[in-house]
Amino acid sequence: DLVRGLQLGLQHYHPKHPPDVHHGYGTEEIFYTDPSVLYISLHRYDNGSFFLGNGQPTRVGSDRGEGYNVNVAWSGGLSPPMGDAEYLAAFRTVVMPIAHEFSPDVVLVSAGFDAAEGHPEALGGYRVSAGCFGFLTRNLMELAEGRVMLVLEGGSNPITLCDALQACVSAVFLQPEPLNEEELVRKPCVNAVESLKTVLHVQSENRSVSIVHVYFLWSF
Ligand SMILES: [Zn+2]
């Protein structure tokens, strides 16, 4: 039922822009009141001015689904563009702690790659490397005893799309490719830290101490 729901959602709600650097609004809508599915989206938002304009960090789910919708909504434009350090920080502080707390049976990834470097500003403008997508995929395999399913979605630069997808498949079946050393040690940019603080602040109202703790770790 879960898989069918996602597929229906993609057909009905994402004729042009599946979840990737854009918000996955159709998937969000389908599961917005459903506490059995934790939905997390990482997307460019820019306080609503980036295309689609939705995916507000304040949208946390409703009714019984409250606390099961997480929008990591990047604001601050392209100064600088978000890259590996920002996505790694999002996984460390928001995605993995909340996902571990939820403890899913299966992880379904809308694997879209228009946050990859090589996309023009209007289509994303970010600089996430192929290797980083592989690394993030590997992170997700800590969940659900490794039951992670990737469904190929967006990405309009065929070269970076192929590289990123290959990195993800390698991460699942072999080892992730090594990450760029500079990105590994780089601090996330100020705009990213602010965006993460916003989502952590909103989400911490709904859940346990662990998330609040992470929030304070990031405050120093
Ligand atoms: Zn997109």
Image (spheres, grey):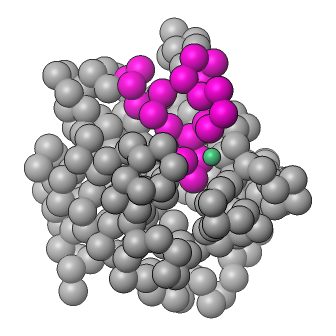
Left of 47 or right of it: where is 198? left
Q: State yes or no: residue 215 in magenta.
A: no
Tell me which residue sits at (71%, 65%) in the image.
Answer: 120
Tell me which residue sits at (37%, 76%) in the image.
Answer: 191
| Residue 85 visible | no
Q: Position of residue 101 (x, y in %)?
A: 30, 45
Q: Quadrant of the C terminus?
A: bottom left
Q: Position of residue 212 (x, y in %)?
A: 16, 62
Quick one: 198 or 212, which is closer to the camera? Answer: 198
Quarter of the view holding residue 111: top right
Quarter of the view holding residue 157: bottom right
**Above or below, 34 relative to 53:** above
Left of 39 or right of it: where is 135? right
Quick one: 26 or 92, which is closer to the camera? Answer: 26
Quick one: 43 or 125, which is closer to the camera? Answer: 125
Tell me which residue sits at (32%, 26%) in the image.
Answer: 32
Q: State yes or no: residue 24 in magenta.
A: yes
Quick one: 24 or 139, which is closer to the camera? Answer: 24
**Above or below, 202 relative to 193:** above
Range of residues picked out in magenta: 10-31
Tell me which residue sits at (70%, 43%) in the image.
Answer: 154
Q: Position of residue 168 (x, y in %)?
A: 74, 52
**Above or below, 68 relative to 209:** above
